[in-house]
Amino acid sequence: MSKPKVAFYWCASCGGCEESIVDLAEDILGVVAAVDIVLWPVAMDFKRHHVEAMPDGSITATLLNGAIRTSEQEEMARLLRRKTQVLIAYGACAQSGGIPALANQFSREQILKYVYEDSPSTVNPEKTRPQTRFEEEGRVAELPEFRNVVRSLDQVVDVDYYLPGCPPTPKVLKGALEALLSGKLPPKGTILSPDTATCMDCPRLDSKPQDLAIEQFRRPHLTAMDPEKCFLAQGVPCMGSGTRGGCEAQCPKGNMPCTGCFGPTSKVHDQGAKLLSALTSTLAAKDEAGINQALKGIPDPVGTFYRYGLAKSLLRRKVDLQ
Amino acid sequence: MSHHKHGNNQGNGGSEPVRVGVYTCYCGSNIAAMVDVEAVAKFAEKLPGVVVSRAYKYMCSDPGQELIAQDIKEHKLNRIVVAACSPLLHEHTFRTATGRAGLNPYFLHMVSIREHASWVHDDKANSTEKAKEILQGAVARVALHKALEKAKVPVNPDVLVVGGGIAGIHAALTLANANKKVILVERDATIGGHMAKFDKTFPTLDCAACILTPKMSAVRAHPNITLKTWAEVTKVEGYVGNFKVQIKQKPRYINEDLCVGCMECIKACVFKEPKFSDEFNQGLGKRKPVYIPFPQAVPPVVLVDPATCLKLKTGKCKQTCVEACGERKAFDFEQKETFEEVQVGTVIVATGFKTFDAGRQALYGYGVYPEVYTALEIERLINASGPTGGHLVTKKGEAPKSVAIIHCVGSRDEHTNKWCSRVCCMYSLKLAHMIKAHTTAQVYNFYIDMRAAGKGYEEFYNRVLEEGVQFIRGRVAEVTDWAMTPDEEGRLVVRAEDTLAGFVRRIPADMVVLATGLEPHKDAQDVRRMFNMSCSGEGFFLERHPKLAPVNTPTDGIFLAGACQGPKDIPDTVAQAGAAAAEALALIDRGHVEIEPNTAYVVEEECSGCKTCLSMCPYTAITRDEVKKKAVINPAMCKGCGTCVAACPSGSIRQNLFEDEQVLVEIEEVLTRAA
Amino acid sequence: MQHKDKTPQAPEAWKPRLLAIFCNWCTYTAADLAGVSRMKYADNVRIVRVMCSGRVDPQFVLDAFARGADGVLIGGCHPGDCHYIEGNYKALRRSELLKRMLADMGIEPKRYRLEWISASEGDKVQRVINEMVTEIKALGPLDLPGRAKAWDEEVAELEGELKEKKGECANV
C-alpha cells in the first residue's frame, strides 16, 4: 500500500504556520517517513501543473494555511479542494481570517492607495498600481487580483477540519497528524483542539479574584505587568477566558496576555462580541462616565476582540465599504 | 455556514420529530380588527413542523384551552404556540392547559399579537404581516424547547407587615387570627397611622378612635404578633417563601419592656411646660422632650427626642424624669440603634401615604396666613383629644363665623399632582359637617366636581347639602388678605370663579381649610427598590395587574395593602389589607412555592473555571467547585436573569427557556419577511 | 424554505426593520402598557423578550444586524431599578463598548440604542420606537445580508470563470 499523500500550501499568511511544521523538530522525520509530500512550496519545488495533473481526490490530506485574499489563492484553494480527501484549514488565518482579515476594516481602494501612494516609504510619482493583466510584445501575463474582502478558507471552499492557532502549536499539529495517519478522525468540521477555554491551563488563574471588578483597562505595552498575577486582575485585557485551549497558555506563561488566536469555543457564535461581553461585564463602574474612563484602555475594540477572527465574525467586514 | 442550528427537529423524547400546534386568537375583535387572524393561521400551516394551525375567538376560554388539549392528544402534538395577548397575562393559563393534556408545559411558547400588534398599529396589512413574523419566530423557537420541571421551595410561614396604619394593622390581625406569626414594623413610635389622627370617619361618622384603638390594642396583645415600633426595614434579601429581612430599631432611650406608660416622667421633665412642636398634632400643639405621641398610643410607651432632650443634647440635666421613673428604671440614655435579622416567607407592604405639602400651592397662602389650615390640622383641632380640646377656634381663640374649604389642593392639577386623591371630597364633606356641628360658622366648599362614589357617600353629600353648607363649583384662584369691602377687613378672602353662576366670587373667611391630596412617601423609591417592586407613574407602588392582581407585586411573595398602592379610603384599605393577607395565607398554606425553571446552568465539561460569572450574580448563586475548578450554579438561588449567561466567555453557561439558540433563531425568524 | 422571501426589496418599497430586545419586568411590560393604552407606533419593530437586559449578549445585537435588522433597540429597567438588582448595569457596560465597536465597523450610531424604560412608561416605548424608525429611515437600509451577498460576488464570478475555462490552465 502506498503512503498517504500530503500537501502543504500557504495563502495570505506570514509564514509562521510553515515554521510551525518545522517546529515539530525531530518528530518531523517520522512524518516525512510516513507520508509522501506532494506539494510544499515553501520547502520543495512543485508546480501547479503537477497538482493539476493528479487525479481528483488523490491527495489524502492538505494542510492549507493563510487567509484568502487574492484570486490566485481562491483558485489554488479550489484546486486543492478538488484533489484532496481531507482539507484542513491550518492556523488562525485559514480558520477565521487571522491578522490579514483585520484589513476587512478597509476597502481595496483604501489599501492600495495607502500602499502604493500614501505610505511614508513609498516613492511612486506615476502612481503605478498592480494590474491583473499585462501585455508586452505579444506576450500576456495574468496576475492575481487583490480581492475586496479577506476570507477564511471555508468561505471559499468546503473545509473538513480546523487546526487553530497563530501558529498552531507542535502539540496540536502532532495530534492532528496522528489522528489522520491512524484514520481515527472526528466528525467533519471539528476544530482539532480542546473545546475548553485557555484559562483552564493558565497558571495565573488562581490569582484571579472571585469578585473581579476591573477599575481601569490598561494597555499591555504601557503597563508594568506582574509576571504571576491574572492579567484581568491587573486591568490588562486578556482573551484567555473566551479562547479555545490547546496552546497550554503559552503567552501568559511568557508574560503576555492571550490575544485569542485559537479562536472561540464551539458554543460561541461571535468571538469578539462574546469577549467584549465578558470583559466589560466585569467592570466596576456603573455610570457612563466611569465606564468610558475604564474603557480608555481598549482604544481599538475591533483589533482587540477580533484580532484573528474578523473574517468569520457576524459582521465580517466594515459594513459601509464598497 | 449557519452559525446556529435551525430547528433540531428533535421532539419530546429526543427522537420524535417536532409536531407543532399553532393557535391564533381573535380576542373577540381586539386582535381580529387589526390582524387578519385567518390569514395568519393559514400562513402558520406552512411553517416547518406545524401539524395543526387554528384560529379561535377566545383562546383563553375553556373551549379554547380544550381545543389545544384535544389536538395534543389527537395529533400527537409535542410543541404548542399560542399567538394571542401578552404572555405576561396568559402564558400561565396555556402552560397549565398544555400540562393538563399531558405535554410538558415548557413545550409551549406564547407570543403577543395584541399588545404588540393589533393594539399599537393602524394598518391591517402591516399588522398582519407583523403577526406572521412574530409567529414564525415562535414556531422556530419552540422547536428548540426542552422539557423543564419547576423546583419546589418551602415557604416560611412567618409574615412581615411593613407599616402600622389601618392597612398594616388589619393585615397583621387577619394573619395572626389565622394562627400565623407576624412581625409588624412601624417607623413611628406608635401604630395607628393617619387614621389615629382623625376625629370622625365618613360617611357614618363613627369616631375613628373608637373603631381603631381596639384594633391597635389587639395587635399589641396578640400572641402571634411581634410589634416593632420606632423601627425600619433596612435590607431585604432572598425570594418568595424565604426572605431575610434586616430591621433597624431606632433608640427610644426607654426600655420598652420596663416602661408601663404611667407618664410620670413627662410630668417630671425639667421643662415645666411643653415647648416643642408636637408631630402628632401637626405642630399645632406642644410636647416635651420626653413624650408619648398620643394618650392611646400603642405601645403605650414614652420616648425621648434626642434633638430637644437636655441630657442627650448637652449631657447636663437634672434628669428629673429618671427620678420619677424610679424603681422601674426604664430610662436608658445609652441606647444605640440596633439591627436585627428576621426570616419570613411573605411580606405585606402597607407603608401608606403622605399628604400634599400645601405650601407648594403658593396662591392659597398656606404658611403665610395663619388662618389657612390643612384638612389634617382641622382634624386635630376638632378632635376632643387635640390641642384645643376639640374647640374649633382661630389662632386668636375666636370661633370662626365663616370657613372656606378648598377641594383638590395637590390633586387633579397639572402643576402639582394629576391624580384624584379619592378621599378629599368625602373628608371635606365630613369636615363641613363637623364644623357646622362645632360652630355657628357658615361653611363654603369650593370644588371642581363632587366625587361621592361609595356606599352611603352620595347620601351623605345630600345630608350635608341639607344642613346648609354652601357649595361653589370652581377652582379657587387665590386666598388673600387684601380687603376690598369693610366686611373683608381683617379676614381672608377666597376668590374663585363660580362656574355655575358664571361670575367671580369673593368669599370672606375666618378660616380656610385646604383639602390636601394624597402622595407617595418621599422615600417610596427607596422602599420600592428594597422590596424589588415597581412604581406607577405618580410614584405609588405598582400592583401586578390593575384588575386581576391588585395586591400582588411583580415580586412573588410581596403584597401591597392600603394607600401605598394609590389613594384610597378606609373601607377600601381594609378590604385590600384583607386581600393581601389572604394572598399571603394562600402561599403559606400551600407550604411551598414553585420556582420557574428559567434558571441558568453550567455545562461542566465546557467550563474552564475562568471565574467571570462569579461576580455577575447578585444572588451569589454561582460558586466555584475548587476541586473540579468549575463554576456551579445553585438553581434554588438562581433567579433566572441570565446576566451570567451573556457574560460567560466560552458559552458554557446556558439558561433554560432563554438558550442562545432559542433567542437567536427567534431573532432570525422575526426579521425574516413573511411571504 | 419556500415561505420566505429573502430577496432584497426595491429601494422605494424598503421599510426599516427594527429588532427590539426588552427585559421582562420593565420594558416588555411598558410595551404591553403601550398596547393596553392603544398608543400607536411604527409597525417596523419586532420585540423579543428576555428576562433582563443583563441577558442581552452582544452576540444577539450583531446577529440581528447580520440577519437584516436596520436597527436594534435594547430596553431595560432604569438604573437602580433592575428586577435583578444589577443586570442593567452589566448591559450598560457592554453597551458602551459595543457602541464604539459598531461605529468602528461602519454601523451608524443611531442604529443601535439602549434605553431605560420602566413598566409605567408606555409612552416612552412609543416615542423611542417612532424616533428610531424615523432616524433609520433617514439613514436608509443597512441590509447586511444583501451587502454580504454583494461582497461575495467576486468569489462567485471566479467560480463561473473557472467553470468556463475548465481544463485549460496557465503554468505556475
Image (cartoon, rainbow, N blue to C red):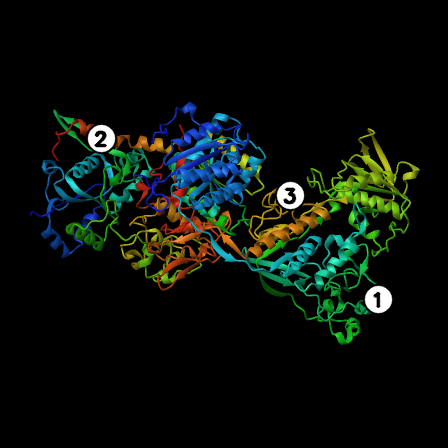
Identify which residue is drawn at 88% across, 52% down. B391
Judge the density around disc 3: few (<14), some (14-19), many (≥20) Cα neighbours within 10 Å.
some
Q: Position of residue B601 (x, y in %)?
A: 41, 53
Q: Is residue B245 left or right of residue B440?
A: left
Front of the two marks 3 and 1: 3
Q: Secondary structure at mark 1?
A: loop
Give the residue number, with chain letter if any, for mark 3. B538
Q: Amino acid at mark 2?
A: Leu
Label placed on residue C158: 2
Q: Tell me, yes or no, whether dots 1 and 2 are on the same chain.
A: no
Dot 3 and dot 1 residues touching (CB under 8 Å): no
Separation of residues labelled 1 and 2 (CA atoms):
105 Å
Q: CA distance from mark 3 to mark 2?
A: 65 Å
Locate residue B380, reporting x and y percent: 81, 52
| Chain label for disc 1 | B
Q: Is residue B226 visible?
A: yes
Instruction: State how far apart marks 3 and 1 are (Cα).
Output: 45 Å
Above or below, B46 relative to B227: above
Q: Residue at x 46, y 40 (%)?
A: B69
Q: Pointer 1: what residue?
A: B272
The answer to whether residue B338 is above or below residue B47 is below
Q: Quadrant of the N terminus of chain B?
A: top left
